Image (spheres, rainbow, N blue to C red):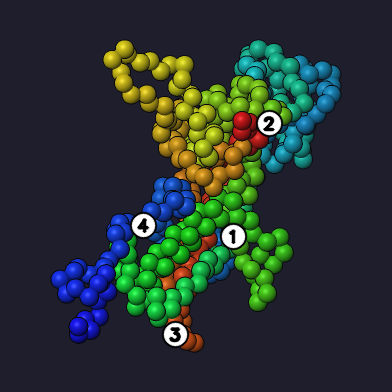
Amino acid sequence: MPFTGKATFSAAADLPELVEDVADIISLVSPWETPLLDHLGDANRAATSTIHEWVEDTLVPNTDSVNQTSFTPDAQNATAITVATGSRFRPGDQVRPEGLREILLVTAVAANVLTVTRRYGGTPTGTLANAMKLTIIGNAAIEGDDRPATQYTNRARKRNYTQIFTAAIEVSGSMQAARKVAGVADEVDYQKQERFRELLRDLENSVINGVAAAANPQGASNIRRTMNGIIPSILTHQFVPGVGAIPSGGGSGNTLNENVVNTCMRTIWEQSSTRIDTIVCAGFQKRKVNEFLSAARLFRPEDDRFLNRVSTYESDFGLCRVLMCRWMPADTILLLDSARINVLPMAGRSFQFKPLASTGDNTTGMALGEYTLEFMNENAHGLIRGLATS
């Protein structure tokens, strides 16, 4: 029998070629989805340096607080009030102490001591207390007066660092030449897809949890450069149930509930010109979010479908998409303004395959990308941590 190059069970010429019965789909069970990156979308620009900077500014604050434990002659009649930051006040300011109907009129400012007229405009008497919040209603200038003292804020340059993500690819000549199964046409291309999925997974994890080095964060020949993620970047609004850090009205205990989320969103809204539009949490806390509707959910006798999912949460302080992300710490949820967040590739360094010189019978290369997180106005975001996880 002549050699045909085909494998058969016998020498019979009419028998079919022996092939494997393998489905044309490879089943992948490892988690690789990136819900937060998908939600944020591609940035409209690239980073142009390994140290990426942006500029933030604030208005002159119109709130301060009393910094005085005793008052002369008493808290209802004292006209010399010590505050935390006197530079925020000017003569002519009307000031409302939180929780009181009384209005104070500032007549003089000396360092952190305000001289005020009590019960201005016939407003009712109030009792001042240490740490009481003071809100500046507005300033009244005297007609024809000279310009007031200059008040301003300094713009601040914030920064983060680019992080390089790499994975090696090596396919032998035999593996590349061999017939593939399960729909794989090219082994090198298949390995590229797998490595890029892994790098995207690692990028999302780093965007959430990554931490920059405390010393030499810009990197060096022997120092790896890592980016600061979202969780380490949030400093102002960290809410911890059960230890008194949840604002007034948020309830007690460490189980996530709608009241806690709404109260924390209210606090962020009060202190920044933002509305939270994204809530990110892991599986357990997502189930707690789903329970926000449990008490109000009704089913009819003919219903044969049980729906227990909250994908959008709307309150007075923001319309939020709720994302379930497996890379979130189990005891933490994020409250984000996604308009202030960008994941930027280094210019010309978005995820790509770089072929490398082969030293043998193989095809080698690297999957690589370099990215950074631009996280603007950290006080426009918040997180709730220390939540119950069982």
Give the mark nearest the N terminus, 1 or 4: 4
85 left or right of 96 in image: right
Q: Which residue is mark 4?
A: 26
User: Residue, x 23% and y 84% (percent of image)?
Assistant: 3
**Residue type indicated by callout 2:** Ala
Looking at the picture, tell me which residue is in the foreground, 256 or 263: 256
The image quadrant of residue 118 is: top right
Disc 3 element: loop
189 left or right of 242 in image: left
Question: Can you tell which of label 1 and label 4 is closer to the viewer?
Answer: 4
Disc 2 element: loop
Label 3 crowding class (10 Å Cα cut-off): few <14, some 14-19, many 20+? few
Q: Does 310 sit above or below residue 352?
A: above
Give the mark nearest the N terminus, 4 or 3: 4
Q: Which residue is mark 3?
A: 361
Q: Which residue is mark 1?
A: 227
Disc 1 element: loop
142 left or right of 188 in image: right
Q: Which residue is mark 2?
A: 245
**Residue type indicated by callout 4:** Ile
Label 4 crowding class (10 Å Cα cut-off): few <14, some 14-19, many 20+? few
